Image (cartoon, rainbow, N blue to C red):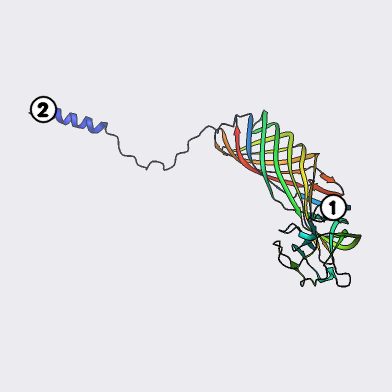
Amino acid sequence: MWIAAAVLAGSSGSVVAQQTPPPSDPPPQHVWIDMPPPRLNESTRHFRVGALLGINVKAQFKMSGQFSVSGANPGEPGVSGVDHLYDDGYVLVDDTGNALGLTSYWGYQSASQFDPVAQTLTFHSAKSFSASGGAKSDDSPYLGLDVAYGAKPWRMGRTQIGWEFGFGYLPIKIKDNQPVTADINRTVHAFSTGGILPPTAPYNGDPGGIGPVISDVATALADDATAGTITGSRTLDTTLFLIRLGPLLHWELHPRWAVSLGVGGAAGYLDGDLRFDERVVSADGGSGQNSGRVEGSEFVFGGYVGATLMFHAEKHGDFYVGAQYMSLGSATISGSGREARLDLSGGVYFTAGVNWPF
């Protein structure tokens, strides 16, 4: 037994001798591990599309000369059974067909139109006016579309060098509501009242043949001229198509962020019309409608400088925001004495959307 005990004692000592003593110091809490630098964006081309917001685009409206009026139709004088429309009243065909050359369907605006001596009612219709004036207007911002394609074939470290072609689509509507003084030339017609005393002005008759009646035959008098005002609106309603092309510098600032700078030439094509919807208001209170439009188109040329900031959401997908300053001069739509000049010399355009590097 003593031999077995000796063997066991020797084995126990060998095991104890082979055990690792506990560490005297605790293990480190932070371990720095050198990692390889992030791989640069290897894409050499890109395509992007987004919204375009334009500001600092202004228009100047001018009118000078003599203008015809497209409003009321005074009708033919000396003829029975026709409608007559004026700036200060009307004499129309009633439900009886103007039996016996008389109508109940008439109205007038001012007591000054009735001549008790001649027993007539006088009506006026503006047929032209002379005016000269202008105003500036700005209804920005304007919202449109931005598209761009580019390539960056040359690289120097984190910097890529290339080019970019951009296209912009921007509807523009600018309105001018400033009144313009004018000299108004009017057609003058007189109608016999047949000895009746007209109802107090303003008066609007009934088409049913009931009520006071007057002659429906107009007598032409000499045209008259009076001072007045042109109110209402003039609207430049057009679309601006923009293109730009120039060199591009691109920097990868961070695995998630990049920025591009571009500068180059730009051109624009303006296509649309100048619309007017006016009222010709005479000094004595009569007013008539005048409306129409002038169509036009024009090319403009200049340059741009811009910057774009990108966030790499994934390998082949970025979100971007950008800004461009573009100087293109002025484009004009004009005709028949009217003019709308669009000032594009200091346009600022903001963009935002999605970019696809590939």
Q: Quick one: 34 or 157, which is closer to the camera?
A: 157
Q: Is residue 35 left or right of residue 20?
A: right
Q: Is residue 358 above or below residue 219?
A: above
Residue of label 2: 4
Tell me the residue that label 1 is attached to: 62
Residue 184 visible in the picture: no
In which quadrant of the rendered view does residue 310 lie?
Answer: top right
How many other residues sit within 10 Å of disc 2, few (<14), some (14-19) or many (≥20)? few
Residue 156 image point, x, y percent: 67, 30
SS type, badge 1? strand
Residue pictured at 73% horizontal, 59% vertical: 94
Horizontal and vertical percent position of residue 81: 79, 55
Q: Quadrant of residue 193?
A: bottom right
The answer to whether mark 1 and mark 2 are in CB contact below 8 A is no
What x and y, as percent, mark residue 167?
Answer: 70, 36
Helix, strand or loop status at disc 2: helix
Quadrant location of the C terminus? top right
Q: Nearer the viewer, residue 85 or 67?
A: 85
Identity of the amino acid at label 1?
Lys
> In the image, is residue 82 above or below residue 330?
below
N-term mark: 1 or 2: 2
Figure quadrant of the N terminus: top left
Amino acid type at circle 2 is Ala
Instruction: Identify the residue at the far right of this view.
Output: 222
Image coords of residue 208 (percent x, y):
69, 62
Q: Is residue 105 left or right of residue 44?
A: right
Residue pictured at 76% horizontal, 59% vertical: 99
Residue 318 is left or right of residue 76, and the answer is left
Determine if residue 58 is in view.
yes
Q: Nearer the viewer, residue 323 or 171?
A: 171
CA separation in Å, label 1 and label 2: 124 Å
